[in-house]
Amino acid sequence: MRHGATLMGYYTNVIECYQLSCKLSYMKNMKINRINNLPMNKDTYALRTVVVNLIREAKNGGANLPWIGVRIGTQTSKHKNVLGCAVMKADKLWITLDAIHLGADTLRNIVFHEIAHAVYGTEHDESCPLMQSALNTILNKEDCLKHLLKYQQ
Ligand SMILES: [Zn+2]
């Protein structure tokens, strides 16, 4: 935990996904206490490209998206079930290695879910297969896009 000296503020708009509840989190720049960023080396860059390509897929499908800050990491010990995090309406998201290893369709669900938080400020909605707080339904490419676009203003 890196609370204390580096604590810059208590953000109320950080949302974590695929846990039972959304708790608040501490954040400074692109650091978040639920996920340890991997060093940005060649391997991490390749993993990030997988996520960036899914963001591009959303754009190509009609989502109007700004530049989004993407980091890849591993869960901290107290947050083993977190697959992704985002800062609401701040265009920043984190995706875990575990999420990437779940395969392309599952990863798309996770990335599009985080995009909705990070860009549109969408809250969890247990009646929506994309924005439910726990990963239950794996949507196909078309449905994933359809649900993301419904949150676009
Ligand atoms: Zn979420």
Image: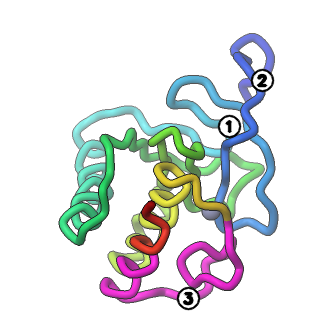
**What element does badge 2 sit on?**
loop
What numbered label is drawn on residue 145?
Answer: none
Q: Which residue is mark 2?
A: 3
Residue at (74% x, 21% y) in the render: 9
Label 3 – label 1 distance at C-alpha? 27 Å
Magenta residues? 124-147
What numbered label is drawn on residue 137?
Answer: 3
Callout 1, which amino acid?
A: Asn
Q: Nearer the viewer, mark 2 or mark 3?
A: 3
Q: Is residue 126 magenta?
A: yes
In depth, the one of 7 and 39 nearer the eye is 7
Give the class, few, some or many, for how many residues have Cα within 10 Å of label 3's Cα (few <14, many ≥20). Answer: few
Label 2 – label 3 distance at C-alpha? 35 Å
Image side of residue 57 versus residue 6, left or right: left
Image side of residue 3 versus residue 101, left or right: right
Residue at (61% x, 82% y) in the render: 128
Earlier-in-chain disc, 3 versus 1 = 1
Earlier-in-chain disc, 2 versus 3 = 2
Callout 3, which amino acid?
A: Thr
Q: Which residue is mark 1?
A: 33
**What element does badge 3 sit on?**
loop
Instruction: Report the quarter where the N terminus lies.
Output: top right
Give the class, few, some or many, for how many residues have Cα within 10 Å of label 1's Cα (few <14, many ≥20). Answer: some
